[in-house]
Amino acid sequence: MGLTNRRIHEGTNIAAAQFSEAAKWIWHDTQLKEDVYCDFFDTYSYNSGSLKLLISADSNYCVYLNGEYVASGQYPDFPHYKVYDEIDLTPFSRAGTNHLVVTVWHYGVSNMSYYPGRAALRYEILNDGEAVCCSDEHTLSRMNPCFQNGYQKSITSQLGFSFLYDMNHEDAWKNETLAGFCPSILVEQDLPMHCRPVKRCTVGEPVQTDLLKAEESRHFLMDLKQETVGYLSFRVKSAVSQRMTVCYGEHLADGNVRRKIGERDFSAEIVLKPGENTYTNYFRRFGLRYLEIFCEEPIEVDYFTVLPVDYPLKKEKKIFADKTDQKIYDTAIRTLQLCMHDHYEDSPWREQGLYALDSRNQMLFGYYGFREYDFPRANLLLFSKDRRSDDLLSICVPSQNRLAIPSFSFYYIIAVREYLLYTKDMTLLDEVYPKLVAITDAFLKKMENGGVPIFTEECYWNFYEWSDGLAGSIGSVEEKYFDSLLNCLLIMALEAMTVISDFAGAERCYEESVEELRRYIRSHFYDEEKRLIVDNDHSHSFSELANSFAILAGVLQGEEAEYAAEQLCTENNGLTPITLSMLGFLYDALLKVNQEKYKDYILKDIRKRYGAMLDKGTTSFWETEKGEADFDNAGSLCHGWSALPVYYLNRLL
């Protein structure tokens, strides 16, 4: 099954440079505030040789050298697993004195990709390995005068804060004309430092846009012509100082960008100065296709767009005989890449969160689409750093959110097994195996009379997929019950752990628990009349997902599995339909029963579902087949789990 015989990790952090003790954690003041921006200024002399910048910050940074943009983007991490970047400054440096300037954005409030730490920056510049500049109490700093510090305007609860930037307060500090700076203070903290485990994202040339609307030179609507992820960038002229609101979105279902959806607000604000205004925000990635601008007074637009931000990947060239298959495949590949930046993302527009279910699917698809292994490895490693008293995984990592989806911890175990089978990289187990054992033991300890009940406490969400009866609810459950899905998933996870333990050379046997669970599920959830597995013990609902799981977990075998597979392929079967996020499990169940028999059905189903999205002009695949109308008009039109055709077109064609 493996696509490579590699047995040692070829990661980017091999022989990485390390900080010296002279490089200190610093900040501008001792006041701990949220959603603030701080500027730092330093100089160094350069004649020849190689220059490397080591840098880490809480929460995000942007580096300029001699007024020129160099890099941005702190890797999402934990305080107990702090990551730094190693950036080549040689191409940006000049003979003589060089000006290093860094702006740090400290979020301070947990979101789906941020675990709060102390506001701080640490950096060091090495010239052929010798330190020539580092952060300490002599580094000059100030609060940034352009960003509205403490604004705390939320885009979504998952994404976190937007921004307000005032062009009137810009000065020449990037070129040593300093105002408002003073020596920094030391931040007393000792964090374990690790070099970024993946490549840095690339920033591309401005996207060419089509102007769809220009009303009175105060209201503009731009089409980027395809789903894009990037940094907002513009040059406009204004006769007066005025506020400009920039809205972004994936669709124009109402004729305009849908800025506000419930409590969400997909916008940023810029206060323009009189004259020319040129600006790029290198902190906040937008996932979008459309930009809409509202101004108080007329403006002249030179350009208004985004700079695309992409994770560097080599796409596997695939040629299909059928044009529809080719377009589906190419769109799925693009969807997958749009959902990869610092880590896997579910939706680049609405959340940008790393979920165990979503990322398991994205890893599996990526093994065929990119044959790239450092990225999935880094994500699996990041999950292992999550710390909870119950030993499960948090809903997203890195995050301080105490909410957990119990079933998602199983997908993490399955993802590690698949990584090992595809890469033969044993080194990952040294760091993640204890976490896998802790997760497994947490569920086995919860077993009662042969099965595992749902989680009833407030911090759990018994979610399986976005369908009736399987979406669960967030918060405490009054009555404890058992369902077939969680117990089938536990079997699948235990079988994965058997494979993983064999890789690790560990003597752990789960066969007895697996057989006990199979007997429990058969006795509690098998309906003799329908010859199918019921979802749970307090309702009489049947779903395509539960019966797909039952086949994959070996609960349904032989003729019973064959009958269930037939039902899964029958229209109007009376079962709760499966959704895009879990569709792969249905396909896998069919292939397990009879690959030759169901191959054509799966290909036809993919063409039907994904062809329907293409017929509506999509350039990336949706979160659900309802598109933007789902979730009260908040459906994502680019979702990583929907890149499924990459895997199955490769496997079946």
Image (cartoon, helix red, strand yellow):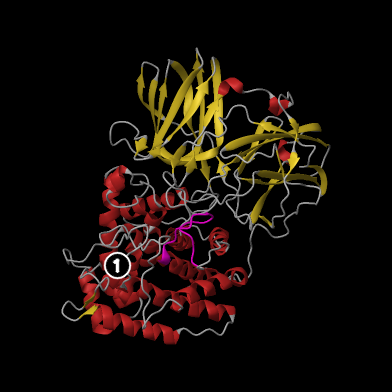
- Can you see residue 448? yes
Instruction: Name the residue located 29 percent from the left edge and 48 percent from the top edge.
Output: 630
Instruction: Name the residue located 63 percent from the left edge and 60 percent from the top edge.
Output: 11
* Residue bounds of the magenta highlight: 392-406
Q: Is residue 144 left or right of residue 355?
A: right
- Residue at the bottom extreme, as displayed: 512
Magenta residues, dominant SS class: loop
Q: Position of residue 488 (x, y in %)?
A: 35, 75
Tell me: residue 276, above or below residue 145.
Answer: above
* Residue 588 found in image quarter: bottom left
Tell me if residue 396 is in the magenta stretch.
Answer: yes
Describe the element under mark 1 as helix, strand or loop. Answer: helix
Q: How many labels, in total?
A: 1
Instruction: Name the residue located 53 percent from the left edge and 73 percent from the top edge.
Output: 438
Q: Is residue 205 left or right of residue 639?
A: right
Instruction: Name the residue located 32 percent from the left edge and 65 percent from the top edge.
Output: 478
Can you identify the residue that label 1 sits on? Answer: 545
Q: Nearer the viewer, residue 147 or 611?
A: 147
Kind of residue at badge 1: Leu
Mark 1 is surrounded, within 10 Å at the Cα level, by few (under 14), some (14 to 19) or many (20 or more) other residues, namely many
